[in-house]
Amino acid sequence: MVPVILALGSNMGNKEENLKKAVDLLSGIISDVKTSSLYLTRPVGETNQDIFFNMVLKGYTNLPPFELLEKCQHIEKKIGRVYRYHWGPREIDIDIIFYEDKVITTENLKVPHPLMQERDFVVIPLLEIDTEYLHPVLRVKVKDLIEWIKEISIVERRDF
């Protein structure tokens, strides 16, 4: 079993319900699941869309990274994700932020997620779960990534 950290987001339909379904389905492939609170955030990139509900999930899996990616994409489809355009609205988005301490750089999978250290909606929820987590590339703890955040998009925090 290896530790994994995923970021989840939704800004279409019943956002909270989409995230609850995703966590429930992910619990079938990830054990010892811990989740952050929900963070309501302004969209990044294409800003003319509804706010996002974001959260972070940490747990352990025995799936290899590309199989985990495939399962995450299957869960997105099961919840009803429709690809519209880059940075566009989505029913559910599941990103693999960390997979153990591995560095993976392919066209379809980049771990650690290349922009996570700049995203308040990833770093701040991750702080709730594990302040001491060490970024495998930057070699800094999550609590020190606050300095890397370029823009604050969080507008509200809610219990999950």
Image: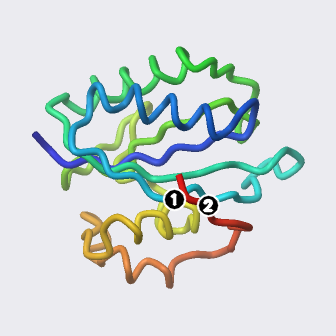
Q: Which mark is residue 37?
A: 1
Identified at 33% across, 52% down, the residue is 34
Identified at 34% across, 43% down, the residue is 105
Q: Sequence order check: which comes first, mark 1 or mark 2?
A: 1
The image shows residue 77, relative to residue 17, as above or below, that is above
x then y, percent, for residue 148: 51, 78
Left or right of 122? Residue 49 is: right
Left or right of 7? Residue 130 is: left
SS for callout 2? strand
Spatial CA span between label 1 and label 2: 6 Å
x then y, percent, for residue 114: 46, 55
Left or right of 20? Residue 65 is: left
Classify the position of the N terminus by image quarter: top left
Single out the residue that lies furthest toward the left.
1
The residue beneath circle 2 is 158
Single out the residue that lies furthest toward the front.
159
Q: Which picture quadrant has residue 67?
A: top left
Q: Name the amino acid type tagged 2.
A: Arg
Which class describes the residues within 10 Å of circle 2: few (<14), some (14-19), or many (20+)? few
SS for callout 1? loop
x then y, percent, for residue 68: 30, 28
Q: Give whichever of 44, 103 is nearer the camera.
A: 44
x then y, percent, for residue 151: 68, 73
Which class describes the residues within 10 Å of circle 1: few (<14), some (14-19), or many (20+)? some
The image shows residue 122, relative to residue 51, as above or below, that is below
- Asked whether the beta carbons under mark 1 and mark 2 sit within 8 Å of each other, the answer is yes
Count of marks, rendered view: 2
Q: Name the amino acid type tagged 1.
A: Ser
Identified at 69% across, 32% down, the residue is 90
